[in-house]
Image (cartoon, rainbow, N blue to C red):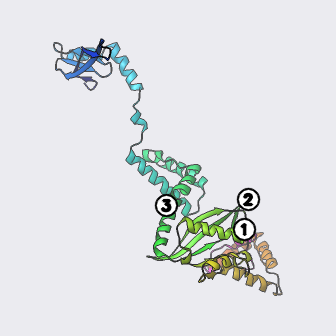
């Protein structure tokens, strides 16, 4: 039987005489359990009892299995689960962690929210209901954010830094970005690698003071943190504000004092926007009024909208006019004039 072992236990007393510094002696009784195989006896793992099978053989085993004490011990043994049942094997745990990282990477790459990530995991569990692997995946909003910020982010940043240190020369770009009441400064690099021109985001710094000296100090912190050489900086890129590219006291001028060969990287989107914005003032018509009237003309009639869609199909262009008009005023510095 599976729950019975042919083991015998002998208990013997061993007397040990110990002599102390006071020449007194004492007797220590020690119980010594010696387990050895004996074909005439069997020991039950559930009951922890040893009984003889020398005469009755299998009948003795059947008698013990049907006894009340053995059945009670088996019920207690089945209720007490082993700790190993609650521990996921290391190899399977690695597969689950890899799957969760892939899901988060896919969501970040395609701009999915962490809430959408949580919903996707629930959907996977429902679709693959019979899969124990799918049921083990847990990637809610908090965990997805932790994986993205503390696992994937540092990993890919390390890859960029290693490539950049090999490339030596690099250009740096940065600009202030507002997220609610928080002002952040993202810094991106561009450099030549083995596969050609490479770009990457390496740092986000929170700083409420958007002045030239603070931005310059933040740039120096980033360069010192990743052990870049300031003299290998070839250009600095940002938007065309006075704090970044002013003639007297700006971020570019402060960097220019440290790196004499530094080039200025203008934002061509801002240059184009400023040019169109200035030229728009000399036009004889108001473009904003015309666009709003066109949208109002088509949006209030289903028949006109269908005719407009047919025209878009005829010229083989995606129908996105309504989306453009609705979101026209939501863009910060690029607007309908551009």
Contact (Cβ within 8 Å) of mark 2 with mark 3: no
Task: Write down the residue under mark 3.
Answer: 155
**205 horizontally vs 60: left or right:** right
Determine the CA span between mark 2 and mark 3.
Answer: 29 Å
Q: Residue at x 55, y 59 (%)?
A: 107
- Residue 288 in the image: above or below residue 92: below
Q: Position of residue 143 (x, y in %)?
A: 55, 50
Earlier-in-chain disc, 2 versus 3:
3
Q: Residues within 10 Å of mark 2 (few under 14, many from 20)?
A: few
Q: Residues within 10 Å of mark 3 (few under 14, many from 20)?
A: few
Q: Report the magenta residues as a range.
A: 314-338
Q: In which quadrant is the N terminus drawn?
A: top left
Q: Position of residue 243 (x, y in %)?
A: 72, 74
Task: Write down the residue under mark 2.
Answer: 181
Contact (Cβ within 8 Å) of mark 3 with mark 1: no
Task: Write down the residue under mark 1.
Answer: 210
Q: Secondary structure at mark 3?
A: helix
**63 horizontally vs 291: left or right:** left
Earlier-in-chain disc, 3 versus 1:
3
Residue 308 among those drawn in magenta:
no
Determine the CA span between mark 3 and mark 1.
Answer: 29 Å
Q: Position of residue 116 (x, y in %)?
A: 59, 54
Q: Nearer the viewer, mark 3 or mark 1?
A: 1
Earlier-in-chain disc, 1 versus 2:
2
- Residue 265 in the image: above or below residue 112: below
Q: Is residue 168 visible?
A: yes
Q: Residues within 10 Å of mark 1 (few under 14, many from 20)?
A: some
Residue 325 among those drawn in magenta:
yes
Nearer the observer, 2 or 252: 252
Q: Residue at x 43, y 36 (%)?
A: 86
- Residue 19 in the image: above or below residue 147: above
């Amino acid at each position: 039987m599976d729950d019975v072992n042919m083991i015998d236990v002998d208990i013997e007393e061993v007397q040990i005489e110990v002599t102390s510094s006071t020449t007194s002696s004492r007797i220590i009784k020690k119980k010594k359990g010696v387990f050895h195989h004996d074909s005439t006896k069997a020991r039950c793992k559930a009951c922890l009892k040893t009984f003889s099978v020398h005469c009755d053989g299998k009948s003795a085993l059947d008698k013990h299995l049907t006894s009340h004490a053995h059945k009670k011990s088996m019920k207690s043994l089945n209720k007490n689960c082993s700790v190993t049942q609650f521990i996921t094997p290391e190899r399977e745990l690695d597969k689950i962690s890899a799957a969760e990282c892939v899901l988060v990477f896919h969501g970040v790459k395609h701009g999915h929210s962490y809430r959408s990530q949580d919903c996707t995991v629930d959907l996977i569990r429902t679709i693959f209901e019979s899969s124990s692997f799918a049921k083990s995946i847990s990637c809610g909003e908090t965990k997805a954010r932790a994986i993205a910020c503390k696992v994937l982010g540092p990993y890919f940043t390390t890859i960029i830094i290693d490539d950049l240190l090999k490339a030596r020369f690099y250009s740096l770009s940065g600009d202030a970005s507002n997220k609610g009441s928080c002002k952040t400064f993202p810094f991106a690099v561009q450099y030549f690698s083995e596969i050609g021109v490479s770009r990457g985001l390496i740092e986000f710094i929170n700083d409420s003071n958007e002045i030239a000296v603070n931005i310059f100090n933040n740039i120096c912190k980033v360069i010192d943190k990743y052990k870049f050489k300031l003299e290998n900086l070839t250009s600095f890129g940002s938007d065309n504000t006075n704090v970044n590219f002013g003639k007297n006291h700006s971020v570019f001028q402060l960097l220019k004092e440290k790196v004499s060969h530094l080039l200025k990287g203008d934002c061509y989107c801002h240059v184009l926007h400023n040019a169109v914005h200035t030229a728009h003032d000399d036009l004889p018509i108001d473009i904003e009024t015309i666009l709003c009237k066109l949208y109002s003309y088509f949006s209030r009639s289903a028949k006109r909208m269908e005719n407009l869609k047919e025209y878009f199909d005829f010229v083989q262009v995606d129908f996105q006019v309504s989306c453009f008009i609705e979101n026209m005023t939501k863009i910060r510095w690029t607007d309908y004039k551009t």
